[in-house]
Every structure is written in structure tokens, then in C-alpha cells.
Amino acid sequence: MGSDFRQYNYNSNWEIDGNEPTLSVYNPEYIYSPCFSWNKSGCQLNGYVYNASYFQEGVYFQDQIKWKGLSILLGGRQDWVNMKYTGDRGYTNQNSDNVKTLSYDDTKSDPKQPQSAFTWRAGIVYQFKFGLAPYFSYSTSFIPQIGSTDYQGHPFFPLIGKQMEAGLKYKVPQKDILLTAAAFHIDEDNYLISDLVHTGFSTNAGRVRSQGFEVSANANITHDLRLVASYSYTDIRYAKSNLTAKRYNPATSLSYGDAISQSGMSVPYVPRNMFSFFSDYTMPKNIIKGFGINFGARYTGYTYADSVESFKTNPYILFDAGLHYDFGQNFSILKGLKAQLSMSNLANTYYVTRCTHGVCNLGQGRRVYGNLTYNW
């Protein structure tokens, strides 16, 4: 049993330059000078200021019961939240004099808005003697959505959800090999997405349903060779939404067609397919004592850029590699000292992680880093 609390203060002050050009993120060739002066002719700037705070307190309990090969987990939590926000103030210089002026003011201090919820979880797993362990779990969730408001400065209802998961874990007898498989179903209400009408704000998309499965393998093939691999499939869609939107053409920066319902559409930014594997090999002592190498790959499938499946970002695959050396294998006085050199995105692949109507996020290029650790 236990209790915890948190105090959260959120202060936002940001500006948007409306003069940015349309360009291809896969071939970003342009000459562009950002505009940061409120009083400069030709600059189209908008600014926003927002302040909010909340205090959350919770009490919780958990009990784990075990009888022979059967294990049962039961837990619950009660939360209380008090939120307070001072509203939103907007600025613009899009007037005849290019002067920073107040475009709207919703900064009246609102009273605290209390929220509370009881959430719980339960799970069961049975461990067979031959290494198989089937399990099932059910849980509910409650997350205050602080730091984000609608375009009128009003806070959102908390994100509430429920999850069911069933799976198998198998430990191969007499082998250092673990295989897992799991299927899941998640419903979440008050899910937030980007507001396509009011740039820079969020809106409540309603209920989102996520379901899929995951498989993984973790194996020490030999004393020196280790392999890890996993694959996940996630189908996440708007299950219940009263929002509609037009599809968007990024080449023309224009919407087209009639507004269509978001219900049944894929949630943006979430890849449907992901796969990764990693291998690590320590050299035999009679060849290069203490040295090891590793290599891996990560595949991320396409994602949609908005809530009506207007266009997709491209899938990408990244490769990683590294070296490690155990000083203690050759020098007994340095037992516990290890060095590692790693390189992520080995091929320096140019890729986009996600896109919205107006912004795309580029992935990290090649990164080389090392560390030295000592354990005793």
C-alpha cells in the first residue's frame, strides 16, 4: 500500500512564423530567412501565452498471491486531481501597421476543476513445469491531460481507458531461450489529436481502439552468441468520433473534397508494423580475448499524417553496430572495467519520423558514442 502526490505547473509562450514555404522533406532545397520581428513589414507572426497548474494525489494497493504454479495479481488506485488554468492570450501582427496587438484574451482565472477516478488491474498466470506460462490481464487507466487545451483555452477531460491482454511465455527447458507472444485490445476515451482548423491546438477525437499482437525471442545461442528479435502489429483507429475533416494535399498545401468522418480511420503517427533484431558476439578467447561485436536493425512501417488518412510517411529501416572490450579478460587488476563503442543509424539514412499538415520531424542521423563502465 502507498500514497503519492505531484504538483505540476505548465507555462507556455510561443510564436509561429507564418511565412514558411512549402517544400519536400525528402529533398529540402530552399533559401529561406526566418522572420522573428513583430514590427517588420511582411512578417506574419502569431503568438500564444498559456499558464496552468494541477495537484494530484493518489492512494494505491497491490497484492500478489501465489499457489503452486498459479500466480494472481490484484491492484487498485484512487486519484484526486485539482486543475487550475488562467486561460489563453493570443497576439498577432497581421494588421496594416505590422504592430503586435492582442488578438484575443481568455485569461480570466477559472476556479479549480476537480477530477477523480478509481482504477484497478488484475492478472493471472500459470507456470507449467515444462516451461510454458499462459497469462491474462485486465487493467483500467486514468491520466489527467494537463499542458494541452482547446483553441478556447479550456482543459480537456482526462484520458481514461481499459486494456485486455493475453499471451504465452515459453522458456525452453535446459536452454537459455525465452519466447513470448501476446495479443492486446485497448479502448481509450478523450483521445487528443491535432486540431486541423486551429493550428497549434489539440481537440478531443473521442474513443480510440487499439489492437494487435507482439512476438519476441531472446536467446543465448551459445555461450558467446546472443540474439534478440521482436515484431509487433498495431491497428489503432478512431472507434467513436463526431469529428470530420477534409483530406489534405501536401504538394499544394490545400484541402480537397468534402469533409469525411474520422470514425474508422487510422490514428496518425503510429506505425502498423515494427520489427527489430539484435545480435551480440563475444570473440573466442583463443582469437581476440575480451573483444565483442554487435549488430542490429530496426524497421518502422509507414504512418499516416492526419486523422483522415490523407497521406503517409515512408517506412524506414536503420542499422546499428558496435564494439565492446572487457579489460578484465586480459588484466586481472582491471576486472570489472569495460569499454563500448556504438554507432546508431550506421548508414546515415535520411528519414522522416512523422508528419502533420504543416510540420515534419526528421530522424536522427548517424550517431557515434562510447562509454566506459566499472562494476565491483
Image: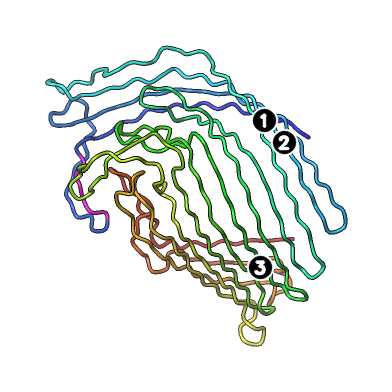
Q: Residue 11 location in percent, x, y?
A: 44, 26
Give the side of residue 203 with respect to residue 18, left or right. right
336 and 193: which is toward the camera: 193
Give the side of residue 44 with respect to residue 279, left or right. left
Segment colored magenta? 20-25
Q: Residue at x 38, y 21 (%)?
A: 88
Disc 1 to disc 2, C-alpha distance: 7 Å
Give the side of residue 116 with respect to residue 254, left or right. right
Q: Is residue 23 magenta?
A: yes
Determine the secondary structure under disc 3: strand
Q: Which residue is labeled 1 in the image?
A: 118
Q: Earlier in the sequence, mark 2 or mark 3?
A: 2
Q: Residue at x 48, y 23 (%)?
A: 52
Residue, far right:
68
Disc 2 to disc 3, C-alpha distance: 30 Å
Circle 1: residue type:
Phe
Residue, far bottom:
286
Disc 1 to disc 3, C-alpha distance: 35 Å
Contact, mark 1 vs mark 3 (Cβ under 8 Å): no
How many C-alpha atoms fall within 10 Å of the one at disc 1: few (<14), some, or many (≥20)? some
Q: Earlier in the sequence, mark 1 or mark 2?
A: 2
Contact, mark 2 vs mark 3 (Cβ under 8 Å): no
Quarter of the image for residue 180 reads bottom right
The quarter of the rendered structure image containing the C terminus is: bottom right
Contact, mark 1 vs mark 2 (Cβ under 8 Å): yes
Q: Which residue is labeled 3 in the image?
A: 179
Q: Which mark is residue 143?
A: none
Circle 2: residue type:
Gly
Q: Which residue is labeled 2 in the image?
A: 76
